[in-house]
């Protein structure tokens, strides 16, 4: 059994591309794969977002605005997942299509339109997205990220229980070929022989860690 946990910013373009890679790979693999997209947010991830957008890092107003935006998007995604993993994933991908691909601003109106398009119960969704339960659920996700030593998004954590008794974590996971090599065992020899803190795989410059 192969398990993949992808820690994401729900409205981040890099994360969107990483999600597409995982979905594409799962469709191609003949083995059983369990995968989850998990929202992740900390102060470092906000700094990364600001750097990518060439925003001044000492702008506290912008920093707080971005934090609140990503935080609410995480709670909204969690609320969608509460109505089933398939509907939650559809909500996430539909939201990213609207915000990332079509360039719409993240706001309550867009969220409501995406929720409706994704077949969610709107009354339940609107209640859950502001509930204490969703906040606690999000906190548990952050605890999981800490246990897996996740520090930035997108970060993928893989467990191949048929091959290893340890996990594999890699950051900035936008390379489909690297993901495929990891999941099909092409890097097993290197992983088993090194078990080093870092591995530069085929020039992809992605940081790979043994957990």
Image (tube, rainbow, N blue to C red):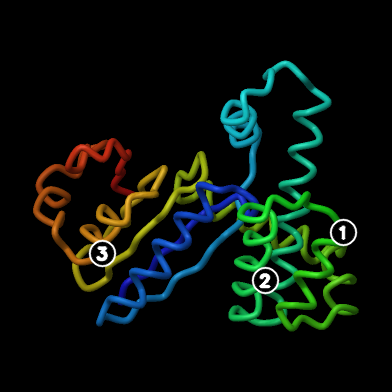
Position of residue 155 relative to residue 32, above or below, is above
Pick whichever, 36 or 167, lies toward us: 36
> Residue at position x 77%, y 45% from top?
69
Q: Where 192 falls versus 130 (above or below)?
A: above
Q: Sequence order check: which comes first, mark 3 or mark 2?
A: 2
- Indicate the secondary structure of the residue bearing disc 1: helix
List the residue tagged with mark 1.
Answer: 108
**Residue 139 location in percent, x, y?**
69, 54
Instruction: Say the numbered circle drawn on residue 91.
Output: 2
Residue 113, position as x, y percentages in the image: 81, 70
Cα distance in 3D space between marks 2 and 1: 14 Å
Q: Is residue 142 visible?
A: no
Q: CA distance from mark 3 to mark 1?
A: 38 Å
Few, some or many C-alpha atoms within 10 Å of disc 1 (few <14, some 14-19, many ≥20)?
Answer: few
Q: Secondary structure at mark 2?
A: helix
**Marks 1 and 2: in contact by CB < 8 Å?**
no
Name which residue lies at 49% across and 48% down.
154
In the rendered view, does 159 fall on the left or right side of 99?
A: left
Q: Residue at x 65, y 68 (%)?
A: 94
**Which callout, 2 or 1, points at the residue further toward the start of the chain?**
2
Question: Which picture quadrant has residue 28?
Answer: bottom left
The tag earlier along the polypeptide, 3 or 1, is 1
Q: Residues within 10 Å of mark 2 (few under 14, many from 20)?
A: many
Observer-nearest of 136 and 16:
16
Horizontal side of residue 86 vs 26, given as left or right: right
174 up-or-down from 80: above or below:
above
Task: Give the SS element for disc 3.
Answer: helix
Q: Nearer the viewer, mark 3 or mark 2?
A: 2
Identify residue for label 3: 183
Residue 7 disc label: none
The reply to whether residue 23 is visible in this rendering is yes
């Amino acid at each position: 059994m192969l398990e993949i946990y992808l820690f994401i910013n729900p409205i981040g373009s890099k994360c969107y591309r990483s999600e597409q890679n995982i979905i594409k790979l799962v469709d191609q693999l003949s083995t059983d794969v369990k995968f989850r997209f998990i929202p992740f947010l900390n102060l470092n991830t906000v700094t990364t977002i600001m750097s990518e957008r060439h925003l001044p890092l000492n702008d506290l107003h912008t920093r707080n605005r971005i934090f609140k935006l990503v935080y609410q998007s995480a709670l909204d995604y969690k609320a969608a997942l509460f109505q089933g993993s398939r509907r939650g994933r559809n909500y996430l991908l539909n939201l990213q299509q609207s915000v990332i691909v079509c360039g719409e601003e993240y706001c309550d109106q867009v969220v409501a339109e995406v929720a409706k398009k994704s077949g969610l119960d709107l009354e339940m969704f609107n209640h859950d997205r502001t509930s204490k339960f969703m906040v606690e659920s999000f906190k548990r996700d952050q605890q999981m990220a800490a246990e897996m030593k996740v520090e930035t998004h997108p970060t993928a954590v893989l467990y191949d229980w048929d091959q290893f008794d340890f996990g594999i974590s890699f950051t900035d996971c936008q390379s489909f070929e690297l993901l495929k090599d990891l999941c099909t065992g092409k890097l097993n020899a290197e992983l088993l022989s090194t078990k080093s803190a870092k591995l530069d795989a085929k020039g992809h410059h992605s940081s790979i860690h043994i957990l």
